[in-house]
Image: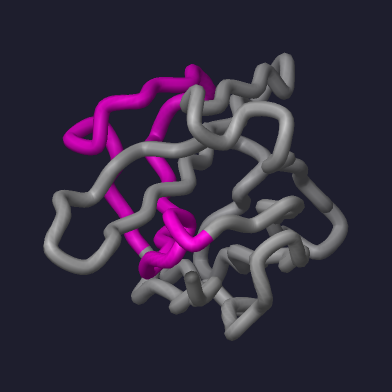
């Protein structure tokens, strides 16, 4: 099982990015997928997740209304579309999957992780 994130980069505050999480050796639409991030000097935090059977979505308060999680099952990919980016969104972003269709915010419940992609929005 391998997850590969892409789409990170440098974007001015107020700008947008779309992160991708592609699955290899795993069918992502069968499982819940989570997005997490780790800012410099901070612990990794959960930011969003999407379930499998009902496509339920959850967001942490700091990104609600600005970030959107979605799936493209034909491409075996999950996306995180980020609008109105702020300096405090600067972090390495990770996707992860767990062997369940149920969403959860708990990092320890996710088994497979990608390598991360850097998002930088300068102050």
Question: Please, which residue is most extreme toward the front here?
Answer: 123
Q: Nearer the viewer, residue 28 or 11?
A: 11
- Figure check: 27 above or below 108: below
- Report the number of discs: 0
Q: Residue at x 68, y 42 (%)?
A: 67
Residue 121 image position (x, y, % from top left): 54, 72
Give, as a single range, the part of the protein colored magenta.
87-113
Q: Quadrant of the N terminus?
A: bottom left
Q: Is 49 situated above or below 118?
A: above
Judge left or right: residue 63 versus residue 13.
left
Q: Is residue 107 magenta?
A: yes
**x and y percentages locating residue 10 in the rendered image:** 59, 84
The answer to which of 116 and 45 lies nearer the viewer is: 45
Q: Classify residue 97 as left or right of residue 28.
A: left
Measuring from the top left, give residue 31's x and y in whole percent: 54, 35
Give the image quarter of residue 24.
bottom right
Q: Quadrant of residue 53?
A: top right
User: Looking at the image, which residue is at 61% across and 52% down?
Assistant: 27
Q: Residue at x 45, y 78 (%)?
A: 118
Residue 47 on the magenta span: no
Please give left or right for residue 111 compared with residue 118 in the image. left
109 is higher (above) or lower (below) than 16: above
In the rendered image, residue 122, in percent from the top left (x then y), is placed at 50, 76
- Decide which of 38, 104 is in the foreground and name it: 38
């Amino acid at each position: 099982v391998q997850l590969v994130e892409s789409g990170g980069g440098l974007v001015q505050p107020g700008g947008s990015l779309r992160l991708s999480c592609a699955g290899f050796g795993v069918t992502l639409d069968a499982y819940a997928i989570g997005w997490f991030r780790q800012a410099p000097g901070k612990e990794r935090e959960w930011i969003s997740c999407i379930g499998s059977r009902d496509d339920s979505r959850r967001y942490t308060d700091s990104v609600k209304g600005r970030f959107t999680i979605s799936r493209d099952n034909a491409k075996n990919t999950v996306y995180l579309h980020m609008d109105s980016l702020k300096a405090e969104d600067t972090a390495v972003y990770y996707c992860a999957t767990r062997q369940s269709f149920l969403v959860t915010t708990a990092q320890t419940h996710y088994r497979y992780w990608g390598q991360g992609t850097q998002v930088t929005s300068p102050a």
